[in-house]
Image: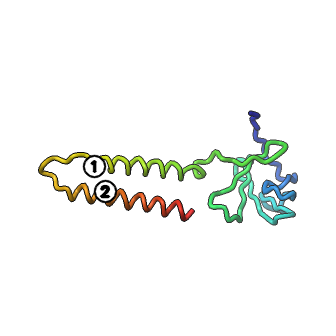
Amino acid sequence: MRTYKSQKIDLNADYPCPCRRNGRIQPITLTEAFGCDRCQQIFVVQEDGYVIEQLSTHYPYKRLWRWTGQQWKLDRSSLSVSYLPLVVLASFGIMVFFLLLATLQTPAGAPSAVRLLTTLAVSLAVMGMFWLAARR
């Protein structure tokens, strides 16, 4: 697998559009931004100078690209892109713990209502996770 080293973005040069619509992004005068002549998107150079960010988008996360010298590579290094699977995994682990806790034999003095309420809470949490996943 080839590794691509990022190059610093020259604010005075034009580049191919990272949206892959055969357009060219050109510097916007007096700003640190680029505009595409084809798809009319605006891209801002981040502070380090190696990454551009798409400003107006309907994509739920920030879209970031790095320039390799020949092409743009989607930057997937930020945690904001991968936080949802981590949250789902942690929630699933907590639900399994409570479900096991609810199904274990309780001591003779403990009421069965506690087990019922715990099972109900876990069921509601599972339904909530499915609802959140369906919203996305």
Query: At label 1, which amino acid type do we have?
Result: Thr
Q: Position of residue 40 (x, y in %)?
A: 81, 66
- The one nearer the camera, 32 or 17, is 17
Query: At label 2, which amino acid type do we have?
Result: Thr
- Please tell me which residue is depicted at 58% across the width and 52% down the height of the picture: 80
Labelled disc at residue 103: 1
> Which residue in the structure is indicated by mark 2?
119
Query: Which quarter of the figure has residue 29?
Result: bottom right
Q: CA distance from mark 1 to mark 2?
A: 8 Å
Q: Residue furthest top?
A: 1
Q: Position of residue 41 (x, y in %)?
A: 78, 64
Q: Position of residue 128 (x, y in %)?
A: 44, 62
- How busy is the neighbourhood of tag 1: few (under 14 within 10 Å), some, or many (20 plus)? few
- Secondary structure at badge 2 equals helix
- Please tell me which residue is depicted at 38% across the width and 61% down the height of the picture: 124
Tags 1 and 2 in contact by the CB under 8 Å rule? yes
- How busy is the neighbourhood of tag 2: few (under 14 within 10 Å), some, or many (20 plus)? some
